[in-house]
Image (cartoon, helix red, strand yellow):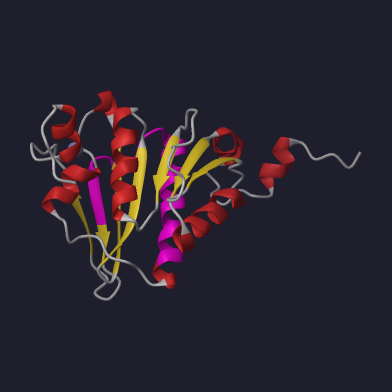
Amino acid sequence: MGETGPSDRYSRQVILPEVGVEGQTKWATARILLVGEGAILTAAEIALKSTGVSHLVQWKTDVPQAPTGEADLTLVLTEDSAFRRRASRLLRKNRMPSLFAWCAGSGYALFAASHQGGHCPCLECFETLNPKAFTRGTPTVQRLLGALAASEALQWVLKGSTPLENKVWVTSLDSGVSFHHEVHASGKCPARLLEEGAVVTP
Ligand SMILES: [Zn+2]
């Protein structure tokens, strides 16, 4: 009487026919860590919640300690480069699958790192070779990117893998061009060098 069972609840929210109840259950039980702030994070959060994701934990720039506990997937959506790097090192060390999204040029970029075995490639492998590939976006692009990152995260949760693994996917909104760029483990990666005990200038 008046009670809504889980399948009723999800059936109203099926956004892709092939997802079905099984897929909706995966989303409903997925534990997702959101790292960042601002419009990108808010847009991702709204998109995730609208599909039934309820286990969301946030880690914001001004909080020194990462939230404890396991996450199935982490979305790194910050525009603070130092914080992004710090998060990347921790996620890599803890072998946590992570999706990074940032504004780039007139558009945006996405990078998925599984951090298997706690190894590279990681975000810093890419950043070391492409230091200028990160920009600050307008609120419109930020919101678009947040929703897009959420969509990729949902696909990853659903399939257990992502076609973006170890790839940076760059989209330019003014030219409409979109391309994939393979990311390889770099010998110059600061995360790896630090792990090996080398002195690295931050
Ligand atoms: Zn690396």
Image quadrant for the N terminus? Answer: top right
Residue 163 visible, this angle: no
Residue 183 appears in which quarter of the rendering? Answer: top left
- The x, y position of residue 51, in whole percent, is 59, 48
Residue 162 appears in which quarter of the rendering? Answer: top left
The stretch of residues the image draws in magenta is 142-169
Report how many numbered discs are placed on residues in the image.
0
Q: Quick one: which residue is furthest to the left in this view? A: 187
Q: Quick one: which residue is furthest to the right in this view? A: 1
Q: Quick one: which residue is furthest to the top in this view? A: 117
- The x, y position of residue 72, in whole percent, is 46, 32
Vertical position of residue 195 compared to residue 110: above or below: above
Q: Residue at x 55, y 47 (%)?
A: 17
Residue 26 visible, this angle: yes
- The x, y position of residue 114, in whole percent, is 31, 34
Q: Main secondary structure of the magenta part?
A: helix
Vertical position of residue 17 compared to residue 102: above or below: above
Front-most of residues 21 and 139: 139
Q: Is residue 76 left or right of residue 34?
A: left
Vertical position of residue 104 compared to residue 13: above or below: below
Q: Is residue 5 left or right of residue 190?
A: right
Q: Residue at x 45, y 50 (%)?
A: 62
Q: Residue at x 28, y 40 (%)?
A: 165
Q: Ligand 1 sits in which quadrant?
A: top left
- The x, y position of residue 96, in whole percent, is 36, 31
